[in-house]
Amino acid sequence: MAVPLSPNSIPQMKEPLFTKDYCAIVAANFLLYFGFWLLIPILPMYLSEVYQCSLGTAGILISCYTLSALCMRPFSGYLFDSFSRKPIYITGYALFVAVFFGYITVKAIGLFALLRIVHGIAFGIVTVGGYTIVVDIMPKSKRGEGLGYYGMANNMAMAVGPMTGLLIHNHGVGYTTLFLFGLAFCGLGLIMGSIVKTPAETATKRQPFKLKQMLLRNGIPAGIALLLLSVPYGMTTNYIALYAKSIGLEVNTGIFFTLTATGMAVSRILAGKLVDRGYITEIIQNGFYGVITSFTAIALLAPLKAYSATMSEALFYCIPIVMGIGFGVMFPAYNSVFVNLAPKSQRGTATSTYLTSWDMGLGLGIVLGGSIAQKYSFSTAYLSGALMAVIAAIYFKVKVTPCYHRDKITE
């Protein structure tokens, strides 16, 4: 006589992560960021040579992109929660690609500034949409791992994009050709994004627009900790080369970013698997140790240089690996915190809150880093950054962790 099987005894089929749609959205994300990073080291030279801009003016023009992306992200969250997600994502991506045509044809500096603003708006739409859609199409049981690979695409683009741009430029290739390269890669990304099939339920009921919907309210404590954490990271990405030069370190600062991206890419994979096993807040708390250590070590480069240039240079190359690992384990876990705090209908808002918090900290880091370094020193700036990371770690443990475990949605 056959014994009836209980529901718990029936083997559960494992849902695959690397589906065609998931691989396509990851590829689209990589190509988007590759086109972005390809231009990063080139634009200051382009503005100087073509428009005869000063460094200050060039900095303002380039920063228009970041500012407009930051302003757009909260609105993007509302759009992706109130309308069908894929059409908005594709429209934003198409706009991002189209701006490359403008870079090729525009010759007036005012129009170039307008293009940077539009490019930032498109970037703000696509990045929020990409993170929202990738969560929609992946199995919940593999969300941490999936976000880890998705974010790794950003890191790989950061590792190879600037080097590729400089390599092409150093071989005598003109700026028009460089913009065409960016257009081609991002155009391919648009094609990859267009083949992604999203679940029907992502087309949500339109909600009336309210300012309070621009941020995930129960995600604000996590956003505050993330903002504090990103301040010293903003200092590093913008001032590490100037810092090394100011203290006489004979190092390749380009390798610093490559090592950081490599550390992030490798650690994301391991962290994603641990996130799926439920160790979300524990991973973030452990990641703080590496991040705090790395920023403190950067502050110590100057006094160590006075003692031993060789030791200071060796430390310079060790720091980005530790920093990359620290941030790499935290990113997929931190992203999961925001996603798990939001119902499916607010995933766009959750993602925009996550990215907005990070971007605000980066911008604040640029301002504070330059101001503190000018008044005191770069060492003081990075020591201040390390202190902010310590405050973020304490705040995360005392405030964010209990709030997360109380408010997380388990469905």
Image: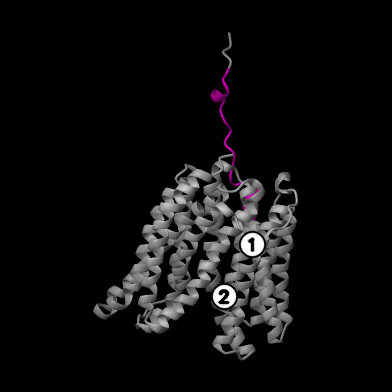
What residue is rendered at 59% in x and 80% in y? 43
Q: Looking at the image, which is closer to me, 371 or 106?
A: 371
What residue is rendered at 54% in x and 25% in y? 8
Say which residue label 1 marks. Answer: 74
- Mark 1 is surrounded, within 10 Å at the Cα level, by few (under 14), some (14 to 19) or many (20 or more) other residues, namely many
Region in magenta? 5-25
Query: Looking at the image, can residue 26 be seen?
Result: no
Q: Amino acid at mark 1?
A: Pro
Query: Looking at the image, can residue 69 be seen?
Result: yes
User: Looking at the picture, how far across and down is residue 237, in whole percent?
Assistant: 47, 72
Mark 2 or 1, closer to the camera: 1
User: Looking at the picture, how far across and down is residue 378, in whole percent?
Assistant: 38, 78
Q: Quadrant of the C terminus?
A: top right
**Residue 20 in magenta?**
yes
Q: Amino acid at mark 2?
A: Ile
Q: Looking at the image, which is closer to me, 354 or 10?
A: 354
As drawn, 18 above or below 211: above
**Residue 109 in magenta?**
no
Q: Quadrant of residue 348?
A: bottom right
Label 1 SS: helix
Say which residue label 2 marks. Answer: 40
Q: Quadrant of residue 167?
A: bottom right
User: Looking at the picture, how far across and down is residue 156, in whole percent?
Assistant: 53, 63
**On the rendered structure, is 130 left or right of 322?**
right
Q: Quadrant of residue 113?
A: bottom right
How far apart marks 2 and 1 lie (CA) works out to 24 Å
